[in-house]
Amino acid sequence: MRHAFSQALIIGALLGTQPLSVALAESNEPAEQQARALWHQQIAAGYQALSTSAQRLSDTATRYCETPNDNTRQLLVSHWREAFFDWQAVRFVDFGPIELDSRAWQLQFWPDPKNLVGTKARQLLSSDTPIDRQRVTDSGVAAEGFPMLEYLLFDEPFNQTEQALPDGRGCALLLATATIVEDNTTQLATDWQALAEHYQATDSYSATTVRSAMTALDILVHKRLGEPMGLGSSQRRLVYAGDAWRSGQSIAAAEASLSGLQRYFLPGLIRKLEQADQRGIADDLTDQFQTTLARFDALPDDLASVLEDDQRYAQLQNLYIAVQQLEQTLELQAAVALGIRQGFNSNDGD
Amino acid sequence: MRTLQPLAVATAIASLTMAGCSTFAGTAQTPATPESVVSHYSDLALATYEDALTTAQRLDTAVDALLDNPTEQTLASAKQAWLAARVPYQQSEVFRFGNAVVDDWEGQLNAWPLDEGLIDYVETTHYQYELGNEGASANLVANSQLTVGGEALTVNTFTPQVLADLNEIGGSEANVATGYHAIEFLLWGQDLNGFDAGNGNRPATDYATGNDCTNGNCDRRRAYLDAATDLLVDDLEWMTDQWSPEMAGNYRASLVADDATTGLQKMLFGMGSLSLGELAGERMKVALEANSPEDEHDCFSDNTHNSHYYNGLGVVNVYTGTYQTIDGKLVEGPSLSDLVAADQPELDTTLRQQLETSMTALGAIKSAAEAPSNPMAFDQMIEPGNQAGSTLVNTAIQSLVAQTYSIEQVAQTVGVNDLQPDDAGHAF
């Protein structure tokens, strides 16, 4: 099923009618375009990497289902991780072609407190109807992305059942979903390229891009880390409130997202800050990205073992504080210096 | 029962269509200044909570009648009273975001979605609860002993305080023991129809005494429902007091004493957060895109269309400075709209038109759900492949997104530069 909502948004974006945008304090055309050219190029690289790794994942899924053995299974797991991390790296981009048809949710429906992914998987696997691409897309966004693949590969109760991979229905769901992810990421990379001229010519995209990074950091701090750590709406530590808990990759995924911001977002921002004569803020941000990313070295990939161990939890708290400070530097210093402010976003609900 | 409230709807639309051609009667008497607008905002909140309280008291009375004489008729009356109680309450949700006094309090009244297996029996094949929630299948009606979060509890009796203490037990927001949705579940029961027509179908005999009792533990179920409706009334009395101009030291006193820009910020933050993140996002887009009836707001009663509609009307109320009471009285006064119109009339006209578009879209959802023939409830609209349904919901989402953009513009116009909620100093 395809919905008109995002289509309208992207059409709006293409027409340059993004009313959310706040005009920048001063607009210097050539300099403006330079920063956006850099952003466009970096994000394009990120989307291309994702498309390539998703294609490899899909190919490996086919190989595994044709020849299921330990080697192909390991390769499949490894390629799922690589593609998933490539997605984490560009997950901050919440505007442009990613908005079409809720593609971000198609790639990763999250948060999923009520385990819709598991419910949809069970519904698809238990019925007699053949599982194909159409059937998966008809099941909604929770069935279509990385979490469904993660469920098939890592969900412990599921992997105790007879339907576990490489069972026929399990493989059918694996192949259909991997193909959808491959097609969606390929189309995303293509659509982003098509946006190049408009993106670079439209001043308001600078603010939109900075805001997307602010939102991503906010989600990282409060939802992806804060909620499972018991620092959000609940004081209870709960691994299921994080993402990628089935694969034990919640912290590794957070690192991939922060690293993606450093690679694909920071260079363009530095360019903008330099143009605004804010070299100091640019240096601070560069340092903060480095020191924050270094904090991941002391932590494992998974969240569960950290939440159960107070000493490790303290290290996670240090990371949490570092990401929060990074968010503040971006929002209260960089964005303010550039005349950009955060508006309402879709995470304002509870 | 006032399902449609045609007068309220007509008034809201009429006041919207007056855009650019007139001012409201109230505004003619009281010039719109940031201070008068914030003060009138408090009047709107008071009037809305007073109605929420009145309709909750009627619900409480209807539930008492059900418990005195459990029949399908008294159960139906209690359901009607619940539906009527949602009309003002949903309009009050615009006061939630930004006002910490409301946001900190509302979890006991309108927390959602809930793991209803905490409260009473459920049909497990249709029951999907929050991951890791130990209380999700506690069934308080059937069990006086439970262990949640490593804590063993004995619950021999249900009183408003006992239920309040049980709410969000174990730190899970899904452990909703109190409020409208707990009562909704106790009146309707689980909706086992999935994407098909129909809502919960709890028999009145679930509240019968002696041998007529169905599904067991009717005495505890009766006590639970009684306590839950009593608590709802208590909570709304407290909140009504917070907005009274005659009560010293309450929330209203601090709000109107504060810098008026702070009040305007709370108004705008409430309008924008409810429009975009909560209503368009959490309550509609998630349910639609994931085709998930679990994410339907009023999932037991299938009253979601009204909850959404009156949420939308709440945003209109705050912007236009109007509120149609359940008795048909129009509360009106200096509004945000007046402030914007004085400075940027085009922006005011745009936002008013967008609000009207949103109400039309939400009204179309409501009309489809209440159609005399072939009605389509919200949980049917989100069924995979239902193009007409997804168009209805998407149209509403789009219009709410559009109005949020203008709400941001209004914030700039009236000098609100930071849309983050400031709750410092206003926590009770």
Image (cartoon, coloured by chain):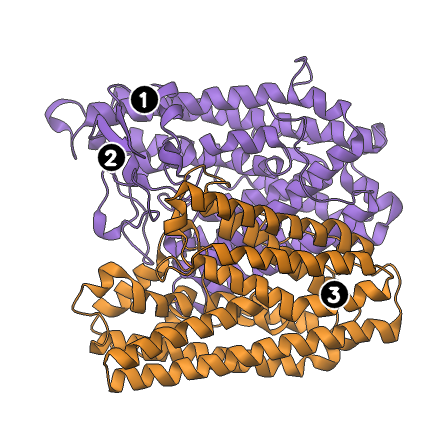
Chain colours: A orange, B purple
Rounded to the nearest whole Å, what is the CA distance between mark 2 and mark 3? Answer: 53 Å
Q: Chain of mark 2?
A: B
Q: Height in image: B113 above or below B42?
A: below
Q: Are marks 2 and 3 on the same chain?
A: no
Q: Amino acid at mark 2?
A: Asn
Residue A269: assigned label: 3
Residue A292 pos. (x, y %): 60, 55
Q: Which residue is mark 1?
A: B65
The CA distance from mark 2 to mark 1 is 25 Å
**Residue B354 versus residue B239 in the image, above or below:** below
What amino acid type is highlighted by mark number 1? Ala
Between discs 2 and 1, the one toward the N terminus: 1
Contact between labelled residues 1 and 2, with CB atoms less than 8 Å apart: no
Q: Residue at x 36, y 30 (%)?
A: B78
Q: Residues within 10 Å of mark 3 (few under 14, many from 20)?
A: many
Measuring 83% from the left and 40% from the top, which residue is drawn there?
Answer: B339
Locate residue A1, reporting x and y percent: 44, 72
